[in-house]
Amino acid sequence: MTITAAKLPLDNSFASLPPAFYTRLMPTPLPSPYLVGVSDAAAALAGLDPAQLGRADYVDLLTGNLVPEQSQPLAAVYSGHQFGVWAGQLGDGRAILVGNVNGADGPLELQWKGAGLTPYSRMGDGRAVLRSSIREFLCSEAMHALGIPTSRALSVTGSDQGVMRETPETAAVVVRMAPTFVRFGSFEHWFYQDKTEQLQQLADYVIDRFYPQLRAAANPYQALLEEVTRRTAHLIAHWQAVGFMHGVMNTDNMSILGQTLDYGPFGFMEAFDAQHICNHTDQQGRYSYAMQPQIGHWNCYALGQALLPLIGEVEAAQAALDVYQPAFAEKISALLRAKLGLATEQESDQALFDAMFTLMQANSVDFTQFFRTLGQLKVAEPGADAPLRDLFLDRPAFDAWAAQYRARLLAEGSEDAARRSAMDKVNPKYVLRNYLAQLAIEKAQNKDFTEVARLLTVLQRPYDEQPEHEHYAALPPDWASHLEVSCSS
């Protein structure tokens, strides 16, 4: 049976909270919307037929021009720390919650991003631009394919309506999906207003809907903080292991489920530099690659402070937060061992990792290419190292590290073919490099959406060789070094 967009079955669990948590409102239509891209995998997860999403009524739905009859659209209020400074009330300034669909893995919230002004837009216009919308769409789906917890992106629609950023651009809407968009800043909002009743209502909502197993804990709110802290530590370990930089790790961009949320000026590491800053707005480097683990911990402390009135004792909150560092260390070590094809855990692991990153930094080695090529190393054939060795300017330094690595592999009886197969499953060949996104954006700005679709197809299989798409794994061209991304979108 064909379901029209107007009849899309929805509910809205967030709307069950008291009115203080949100503002009900309708999206602002965009003129003559058109479909830019759709993720068939995300559509299937949401129980939608991808073939229907190109119909005019669904394009209107995906843009916010048509609101399903059962929808209760709303914009949520929250607050947060931005670049370490308390920013006060924020909220969904250009995002509107459509409602929940019953997805394959449970209920999913659908959210229009770029659907117009809300009471929380502050000085903004409530719109998103095509450029940033394509980036979020592609990266959300790419991160999922990499096995990293993330919100998903169902679609991008565009319109010729102009919006002004640094230069004139055109408007777009991303439909993104997650079990919930509640964030650390949602709790901070009520803590800083000294409204414990609303704080508890929100915490109970999150526990009962997303963490029901915690209800039996002696202190469910402490258990909530501990579980979110652990998930956040694991998430950032995944980021570090794949070279992903979020760019804006404000507390209002941190998911209460430990998922990657709010793709803005993100980037994937290319020439390795631990101090790399992917966000041009971040002049102080607060959210550099090297700082991400520390900032993740800081953000968990901000959440812990917000939950303290419910937890009751500082010591109990501190005990929950103390799981962060060991959880991160254990996860990143396990991920790096897998990336190096190591089957056992040894005390010397950290020294091997540190020497590797020092070598990569000194030689500005491409992050993704290094780990992918490392799988080709043959334990008994140092003379066959040329493809890997040629990534380094200082070949003798690489040879010295490779000797340590080989010794470790020999000690555990590593077999070349099996190790390469395992490494290729965790070291992607394809990531969303900035220049690839830029090429897709430039074509889309000329109404050619084929590169968006093609790039999405490649990124949904990041660990496969895909010889027909080999050029997507190439080093960035010289012009790509001038690309900058910032908080403007």
Image: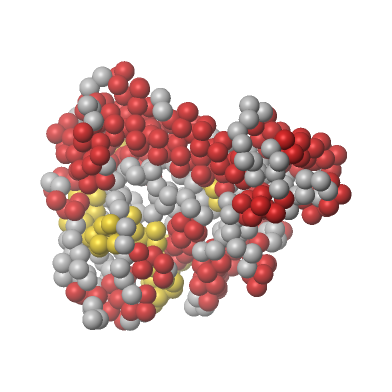
Q: In the rendered view, would you say 7 is above or below 200?
A: below
| Total tally of numbered discs in the picture | 0
| Rendered-image quadrant of the N terminus | bottom left
- Given residues 283 and 185, the one toward you in this image is 185
At 63% from the left edge and 51% from the top edge, which residue is drawn? 423
Name the residue at 46% across, 60% down.
141
Q: Nearer the viewer, residue 399 or 432?
A: 399
In the picture provided, is 123 more to the left or to the right than 485? left
**Residue 212, horizontal then vertical, whole percent:** 23, 42
Tell me where residue 144 appears, x and y as whole percent: 46, 56
Left or right of 345? Residue 24 is: left
Look at the picture and state if 160 lies above or below 293: below
191 left or right, relative to 70: right
State which quadrant residue 224 falls in. Answer: top left
- Residue at 65%, 73% (x, y): give it: 468
Q: Using the rendered image of the protein, determine whether residue 277 is visible from the camera's viewpoint.
A: no
The residue sitting at 66% across, 49% down in the picture is 419
Quadrant containing the C terminus is bottom left
Q: Is residue 208 visible?
A: yes
Q: Is residue 217 above or below residue 427?
A: above
Colour pattern: secondary structure
Residue in front for this viewpoint, 106 or 190: 106
In the image, is 90 to the left or to the right of 406? left
Residue 182 spot, x, y in % from top left: 29, 46
Give the quarter of the image for residue 273: top right
Where residue 177 sits: x, y (%)? 34, 58
